[in-house]
Image (spheres, rainbow, N blue to C red):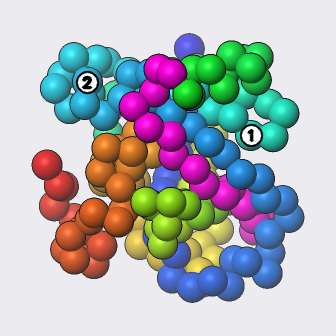
Amino acid sequence: MGIEIERKFLLASDAWRAQVTRSMQFAQGYLVGAAALAAGQARASVRVRRAGDAAWINIKAARPGIERAEYEYPLPPADADELLATLCDGVLRKWRHHVRVDGVLFEVDEFLDANAGLVVAEVELPQVDAPFPRPAWLGREVSRLSRYYNVNLIAHPYARWTAAERGGDDAEAT
């Protein structure tokens, strides 16, 4: 079984930009998305993702937290394009920047369109309690706040967040 252990953070500054080693633009949509998950009609999100000449389908357990079952498989790019255009409720676009700190990869996602202005850093870990560097640009952890999950950003984009949601109120939006 595939397990993803991932922690997500807001950013305290733009200092990470000087350390970017690679950037790519992603388009992704969900075949099983936020509405089905919120209604309790699905136990997993199913995502189609396209970046450059590559594409994947991803299945991730629908439970909050930093440790979740996850499976990812390559997909022909033409199939991904068709799925994104016809079967997804919307498409999320973002730039993903790779930033290494003391040998640890941080993936900084800079969202576009209705999610412009939202920038988060993710770090995947080998175990839940694994240590990792804490650069000064790494801000508050939001790993357990589902409004920051990509699946929810299509249904409730950052542009529609309330001041409380943007300002760090940890209460989840409904």
Query: Taking 155 as reference, is 17 above or below it?
Result: below
- Tell me the quarter of the picture where residue 19 sits: bottom right
Mark on residue 51? 1
Residue 3: x percent and y percent? 54, 27
Mark 2, other Cα within 10 Å: few <14 / some 14–19 / many ≥20: some
Kind of residue at disc 1: Ala
Query: Taking 144 as reference, is 44 above or below it?
Result: above
Please indicate whether residue 100 sits to the left or right of residue 145 in the image: right
Q: Which residues are magenta?
A: 86-103
- Tell me the quarter of the picture where residue 151 sits: top left
Query: Along the line of sight, which residue is nearer the eye, 77 or 138?
Result: 77
Mark 1 or mark 2, earlier in chain = 2
Residue lying at 67% horizontally and 46% vertically, measured from the top left: 26
Q: Quadrant of the N terminus?
A: top right
Residue lying at 49% horizontally and 67% vertically, measured from the top left: 116
CA separation in Å, label 1 and label 2: 26 Å
Residue 75: x percent and y percent? 72, 17
Which SS class for mark 2? Answer: helix
Residue lying at 35% horizontally and 66% vertically, measured from the top left: 159
Query: Taking 82 as reference, is 23 above or below it?
Result: below
Mark 1, other Cα within 10 Å: few <14 / some 14–19 / many ≥20: some
Which SS class for mark 1? Answer: strand
Task: Inspect this view and state whether residue 11 appears.
Answer: yes
- Tell me the quarter of the picture where residue 36 sits: top left
Residue 83: x percent and y percent? 57, 20
Residue lying at 74% horizontally and 40% vertically, measured from the top left: 51
Query: Along the line of sight, which residue is nearer the eye, 103 or 84?
Result: 84
- Which residue bears the numbered disc 2? 36
